[in-house]
Image: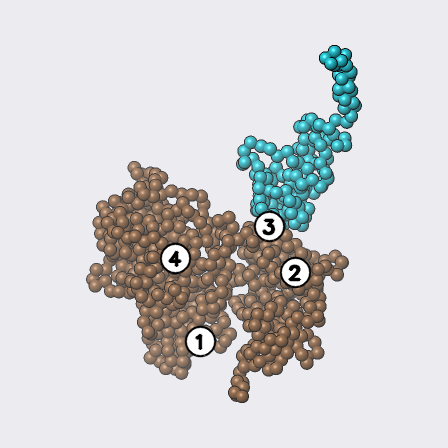
Amino acid sequence: MALKEVLLGPLYIARALATTFKHNTKPIVTIEYPERQKAVPPRERGKHILHRYADGLEKCVGCELCAIACPVGCIVVEAAENTPEHRVSPGERYAKRYEINLLRCIYCGFCEEACPYDAITMGPRYDLADDHPDKFIAVKEDLLEPLSASISDTAIPSGAPSAQPVARKW
Amino acid sequence: MAAVQTDQVTLTINGQSVTVPKGTLILDAAKKIGIDIPIFCSHPKMAPVAVCRMCLVEVEKLPKLQPACAVYVADGMVVKTTTEQVGKYQKDVLGFLLINHPLDCPICDKGGECPLQDQTYQYGPGASRFDFPKAHFDKSVPLSDKILLDRERCILCWRCTRFSEEISGERELALIQRGTNTIIGTFNDEPAQSNYQGNWTEICPVGALTSRQYRFISRPWDLDRTASICPACSMGCNIQIDARSNRIGRFQSRENVAVDDSWLCDRGRFSFPNFQRQGQERPRVRRNGSLEEVSYEEAIAFTADALKHAGGQVAGWASPADTNEELFLFSRLFREVLKSAHLDHRSGVVADAEPDDIALPIADIERCDQVVVLGGQGVIDAAPVLHLRLFKSERKGVKILKVGVTEGKRALDAIPAEAQAIGILATEADKQAAVDLQAKLAKKVKGSVRRLIVTTGPNGRGAKDLGILPHQGPGYASLNGRAGRGRLQWPGAGVKGLYVHESSPLHGFVPSDAESMWLSTLPLVVFHRFKASPLDEVAHVILPGHAFTEKYGTVTNMEGRVQRIRRGIDAEWVREDWRVLQQVANALGASWAYESVEEITGDLVRELPPYAAVNQEARVLWSEST
């Protein structure tokens, strides 16, 4: 008995290794997060983005419809009037203060639906961990698209760490 | 069958029978039985014009739809407001009104409380059939330093122009041009000067007329609304404090037919920035020449100690914008605890107050034959909403005589001996002239002659009623020779200390030149107040208190009506004024144990039974004659 197992041992090893080597040739499932990141669906509801027009002016007019549509009340908006010296948005009114409590937010996307100017959309970012609750109050500067010519309305903001999504099937 | 009353008519609206007096509009008859007819141009205080066509209803036997806001009821009329044809017309009228309306609701201050928005949702078409470019007009045109006009949003309902013509009588706004080019404007585009412009923003059924102060401050759903009283003058107009995040956004009117008839003046409406609180503040006590922050306990102990030191020679000045409850405690602190009669709420020389000063209720101005405004514009300036009441009375046929204070003779000659009811209006400062004129008129005419004296401050009348006077106790009681000195005599009267209480910067203690000299030499000045003022510099104790808009209580207006004010803004770190007064009194040996404002009101009513009127927000009647 023992002798037979000794003699067949290399065979068992070879069979086991065959399984190992077989998987070596198959596509890799694991993603090396955070260096590499999975592409999110185009309609992903991640951290919100406040958009700008092509000329850099903000789309948000501070109408607070997002705030009233929000089922958890996590949005605070205060409006102010544009002046020729201080023009933030094209019309008469802009959002002086725009804050979202990202911990309270349930990422339902109602704000996006309520917005009459497509100023707020849900973005692709989901990596929102941090070390203090206060850091989850996203102020206007955190949410605004950066002022950059290469950014179109729908692109992922350059702040998101996924320049090279892994192009691979599950 | 009983005899048919000739002044009542019965009609049917949507199958429901309703009986209303003759001369009622279909709209009001429908409102009586709870049937809602959409309106834009119609306003209960103005004559019908039927320009918006929103209220079209079907009336049987009439070939076309009729405007419910302009057709009077008739006996046996059959009105239908919900037929298919009415619905179609409502959709079409809204479609027409919206052709050139920019639909910029997201940036419009009216959005959320806009009749056009609400009624479009309720009665309007889902989509516009008009796909041509909209006509564009000027946006945010400043009509004055208070009001902005957005001509695109205007639906030409004429409410503002009619207000200007029928309610204020100033005829400042008018329709200019014709057809689609019609716009609202002032003559030559000059700034509007009316003192009643804020009302335009309230009656505008769209966002065409908006307040510059309230511009983009808030959306209506953010506002915490509190019913209160206007702090600006003694009229006692009912307001609503609209606050967002604990800051006042605006004052809106709240209809009280007996007082303000649903209007406010701009001085009151736009007075709210005076009541915005800047940061937190702690009590301060002057030690070695400089003010040090201390706790309330320490400041109260210091105050009590210093007051005890000054003995009975302490003078007390309470602002005519304090509540009756505070004044009640203030008067008790001085009369019972400090044994001082040097109490005052006045800033100048005025004649003695008497209960007869309120004999003419504000609403009764309309029921007089002749009203003498002694002092003309001076009276209107003291209580601007009175002008609207006088103009309304004048339109009803009351003869209004505006004469100078010294021209009483002119009024006396102009009033015929057969006049039935005569009213005299005058300010507190001109009261003596009013009393003299009243006596002369009473001899000349058969009818009643009554006067209404315009007091100072939202509770000037209450301060007199509660005896914040050197020579009269609560309820105009005589002091039997124990009278104190008034404010003007305090310098040079051996006063060793002064306690000033105020809660409104509009009616604060403003020292005259002579008083400034005296104040700087005074060994004790206790300043219990809401907002910093020059008096801070000479104060030895500064006790922060609540503003008029931050507390509960009651105030008495010029006609003696006791109305409640309520807390619209929370300033919890500030101790209630009445509590501080109580603690000062208790530290001086009293044993008051009030736990709430209501308890003080209860005690006040026990002491002054006429103040039981507070429960009905009615007028305080001191005797049968008033």
Earlier in the chain: of badge 1 and badge 4, it is 1
Residue B434 against residue B135 in the figure, above or below: below
Q: Say whether marks 1 and 2 touch (CB < 8 Å).
A: no
Q: Is residue B479 left or right of residue B79?
A: left
Q: Indicate the secondary structure of the residue bearing disc 1.
A: helix
Q: CA distance from mark 1 to mark 4?
A: 32 Å
* Residue B196: mark in rendering: none
Q: Indicate the secondary structure of the residue bearing disc 3.
A: helix
- Residue A57 visible in the shown view: no
Residue bearing mark 4? B553
Quarter location, residue A41: top right
Q: Write down the colour of chain B.
A: brown
Q: Position of residue B361 (x, y in %)?
A: 40, 70
Q: How many marks?
A: 4
Badge 4: chain ID: B
Residue bearing mark 3? A68
Q: Are marks 1 and 4 on the same chain?
A: yes
Q: Indicate the secondary structure of the residue bearing disc 4.
A: strand
Q: Nearer the viewer, residue B228 or B275?
A: B228
Residue bearing mark 1? B367
Q: Is residue B281 left or right of residue B196?
A: left
x 34%, y 41%: residue: B295
Residue positioned most to the front: A1
At label 2, which amino acid type do we have? Tyr
Residue bearing mark 2? B121
- State which chain is coloured cyan: A
Q: Are marks 1 and 2 on the same chain?
A: yes
